[in-house]
Image: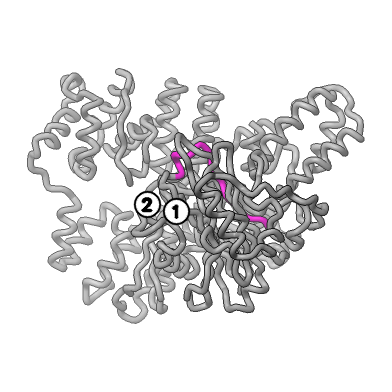
């Protein structure tokens, strides 16, 4: 329980007990936690003082284990060169080359003993852990269930844990509605497996055949976004009857099923609709249409035919009944017709029925539609975080059209938010303009902190960035390479530090390890001042599975970075200096966790993947074009930011103030509701 509570709320649960634990014991406990970068708040210490020593010891041991995993300290870090970074800095190129060749051919490492290192002298801020309670802990499920944003893999695991742990007792935590269909599928599948008596709660919300398909995919541990095909597992008779019953009552079932025809044919092999033909005749007939290619004209085919003819009026008649689809095709419709007034008027009438996430994205798109855009970036659905980018610009719209659409979106959002409970005096931190709204979490990696891709965080006060990776072999040898690619202000590639180039003018690599039977680690130190002297603005952290295994096939692999000012002090891996740590578990061989903008002293949150099969060797040199494109895309994103979202709420539901201390509701980077409260933002403000 505390593992989830600490990760999501920075709070801990401590059972009531009668006893006394000496203050000296608690001081030792506190000091040990500081080495991991955490500190217990006064309310936690007070609860521990009135607890018996054996319970304090149990609490401490479990907490340390959870915190070590969060920052990556649960594994031993032994770099190739134990005296890193000085040992690499002082070694000749010939020595580095010779040691590498010996390691590649024999897997032996230099037998150098690490010299005793001076104590850590870094001054780092500590993360505060406060006392929580069971009611607050269980509210996490309610927040997740109400999310309007697709779950991340971490969210899915937590939802399944809550349902499996509490079963029918979670009924009071389930909301009246489930706005995100992907999340509905995840929750419905968990209930069907662990709390079948609660399926009736989600039953009214499974309204389409695609909803039923997503539930079947979730039951088979597949991708509920449907971006990737799923291998369906066996279903019980009760599960088959439930899924076919949902198909039977769905409207436009044939049209819906034709969108995913191959998936439905495969699912039909597991559901056996013919056995239930008398009970669910419409479902059986729909499967017959798919299997025998019987003719059926779909809604989308009618829309596409109208667009092909340029008949905007006919398309508007079709889309009037589907406002979400109207919003997504709005730019196309405005580019087709000579008179955009009818398009804008139709959208304005239906905007109230468009979801908040879609309205926010349409608002952001049209608000900056007329501004020049060097690169357009797209994040496709799926469990692997990919970015597509193009330099093609959209054709211009008539003057004032984009502003009118943005105004229609803003009016609809303000009216919607005004119906929510009042917020009182609101303080909205201007720094929130650097943090993007969490629309897509389905491919977010499990991490110490989670943000939306493209968000910018300020760099801590440090001189050196120390990147790290740790991994362990799977059924055969695994070679993961940590690299740093350096780009100038104009996105021109300047240099890189990687396994084939262990040092340059500003960075040093700890040595290439190509085998990890018991785990292996690599580090890179980047001197930010020296980078600036050479015209480096962006430093890209890159992880390449050189041996070709996808990260999801590894027993364990994680990476992150530390902020250091005295890199020679303390151990090479110092948990308290870890700023971020990310688990690598996607179906890809190339991952870029972060981009460091040294000019603005910000970290651009990336957490994205490049292509699965590179054209050349899987290293930085073989993927320079893709990395450069990604840097350009993520550093120039035009997506809705949290300042805009919270500003709209404040205008609709309260009064704005510039004094955070006098505000009833605070939206800020470091207090109140922060960008790291992604589950609350997704549930309560979207």
The numbered mark at residue 590 is 1
- As rendered, which of 21 and 480 lies closer to the eye? 480
Are the residues at dot 2 and dot 1 in contact (C-beta closer than 8 Å)? yes
Looking at the image, residue 640 sits to the left or right of residue 464; the answer is left
On the image, the x and y values in percent for residue 248 come to 23, 30
Looking at the image, residue 647 sits to the left or right of residue 9; the answer is left
On the image, the x and y values in percent for residue 128 come to 75, 47
The numbered mark at residue 612 is 2
Which residue reaches farthest bottom?
A: 399
Above or below — where is 243 with respect to 624? above
Q: Quadrant of residue 288?
A: top left
| Residue at (43% x, 71% y) in the render | 367
On the image, the x and y values in percent for residue 445 come to 51, 47
| Residue at (82% x, 37% y) in the render | 29
The image quadrant where one finds the N terminus is top right
User: Can the viewer see residue 356 in this picture?
Assistant: no
Q: How many marks?
A: 2
| Residue at (44% x, 46% y) in the render | 442
| Residue at (79% x, 57% y) in the render | 122
Q: Distance from label 2 to label 1 (Cα)?
A: 7 Å
SS under mark 1: strand
Magenta range: 551-562
Q: Quadrant of residue 337?
A: bottom left
Q: Quadrant of residue 461?
A: bottom right
């Amino acid at each position: 329980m505390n593992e989830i509570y600490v990760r999501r709320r920075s709070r801990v649960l401590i059972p009531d007990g009668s006893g006394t634990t000496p203050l000296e014991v608690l001081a030792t406990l506190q000091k040990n936690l500081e080495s991991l970068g955490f500190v217990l708040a006064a309310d936690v210490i007070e609860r521990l003082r009135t607890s018996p020593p054996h319970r304090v010891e149990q609490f401490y041991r479990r907490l340390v284990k959870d915190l070590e995993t969060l920052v990556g300290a649960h594994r031993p870090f032994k770099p190739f060169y134990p005296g890193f970074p000085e040992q690499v800095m002082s070694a000749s190129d010939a020595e580095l080359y010779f040691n590498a060749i010996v390691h590649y051919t024999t897997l032996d490492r230099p037998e150098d003993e690490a010299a005793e290192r001076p104590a850590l002298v870094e001054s780092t801020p500590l993360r505060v852990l406060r006392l929580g309670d069971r009611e607050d802990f269980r509210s996490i499920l309610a927040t997740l269930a109400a999310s309007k944003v697709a779950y991340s893999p971490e969210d899915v695991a937590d939802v399944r844990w809550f349902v499996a742990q509490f079963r029918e007792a979670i009924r009071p935590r389930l909301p009246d509605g489930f706005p995100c269909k992907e999340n509905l599928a995840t929750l419905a599948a968990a209930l069907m497996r662990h709390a079948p008596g609660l399926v009736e709660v989600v039953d009214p919300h499974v309204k389409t055949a695609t909803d039923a398909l997503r539930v079947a995919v979730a039951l088979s541990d597949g991708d509920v976004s449907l971006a990737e095909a799923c291998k369906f597992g066996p279903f019980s008779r009760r599960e088959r009857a439930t899924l076919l019953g949902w198909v039977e009552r769905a409207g436009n079932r044939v049209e819906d099923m034709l969108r995913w025809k191959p998936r439905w044919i495969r699912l039909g092999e597991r559901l056996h609709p013919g056995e239930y033909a008398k009970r669910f005749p419409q479902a059986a007939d729909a499967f017959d249409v798919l299997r025998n290619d019987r003719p059926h004209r779909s809604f989308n085919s009618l829309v596409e035919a109208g667009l092909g003819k340029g008949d905007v009026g006919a398309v508007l008649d079709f889309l009037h009944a589907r406002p979400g689809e109207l919003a997504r095709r709005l730019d196309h419709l405005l580019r087709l017709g000579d008179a955009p007034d009818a398009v804008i008027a139709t959208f304005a009438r239906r905007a109230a029925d468009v979801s908040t996430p879609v309205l926010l994205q349409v608002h952001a798109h049209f608000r900056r539609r007329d501004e020049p855009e060097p690169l357009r970036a797209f994040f496709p659905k799926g469990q692997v975080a990919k970015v597509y980018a193009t330099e093609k610009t959209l054709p211009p719209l008539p003057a004032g059209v984009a502003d009118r659409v943005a105004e229609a979106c803003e009016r609809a959002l303000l009216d919607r938010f005004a119906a929510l409970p009042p917020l009182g005096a609101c303080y909205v931190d201007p720094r929130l303009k650097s943090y993007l709204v969490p629309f897509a979490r389905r491919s977010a990696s499990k991490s110490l902190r989670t943000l939306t891709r493209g968000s910018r965080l300020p760099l801590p006060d440090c001189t050196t960035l120390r990147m790290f990776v740790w991994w362990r072999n799977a059924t055969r040898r695994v070679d993961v390479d940590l690299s740093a690619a350096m780009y100038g202000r104009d996105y021109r590639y300047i240099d890189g530090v990687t396994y084939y180039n262990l040092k340059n003018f500003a960075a040093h690599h700890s040595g290439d390890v190509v085998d990890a039977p018991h785990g292996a680690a690599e580090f890179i130190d980047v001197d930010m001042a020296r980078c600036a002297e050479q015209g480096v603005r962006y430093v890209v952290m890159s992880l390449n599975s050189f041996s070709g295994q996808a990260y999801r096939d590894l027993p364990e692999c994680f990476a992150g970075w530390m902020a250091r000012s005295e890199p020679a002090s303390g151990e090479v891996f110092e948990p308290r200096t870890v700023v971020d740590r990310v688990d690598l578990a996607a179906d890809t061989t190339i991952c870029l966790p972060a981009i460091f903008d040294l000019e603005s002293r910000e970290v651009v949150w990336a957490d994205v993947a490049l292509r699965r099969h590179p054209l050349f060797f899987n290293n930085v040199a073989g993927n320079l074009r893709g990395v450069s494109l990604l840097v350009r895309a993520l550093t120039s994103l035009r997506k809705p930011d949290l300042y805009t979202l919270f500003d709209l709420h404040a205008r609709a539901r309260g009064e704005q103030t510039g004094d955070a201390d006098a505000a009833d509701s605070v939206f800020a980077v470091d207090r109140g509701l922060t960008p790291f409260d992604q589950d609350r933002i997704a549930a309560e403000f979207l």
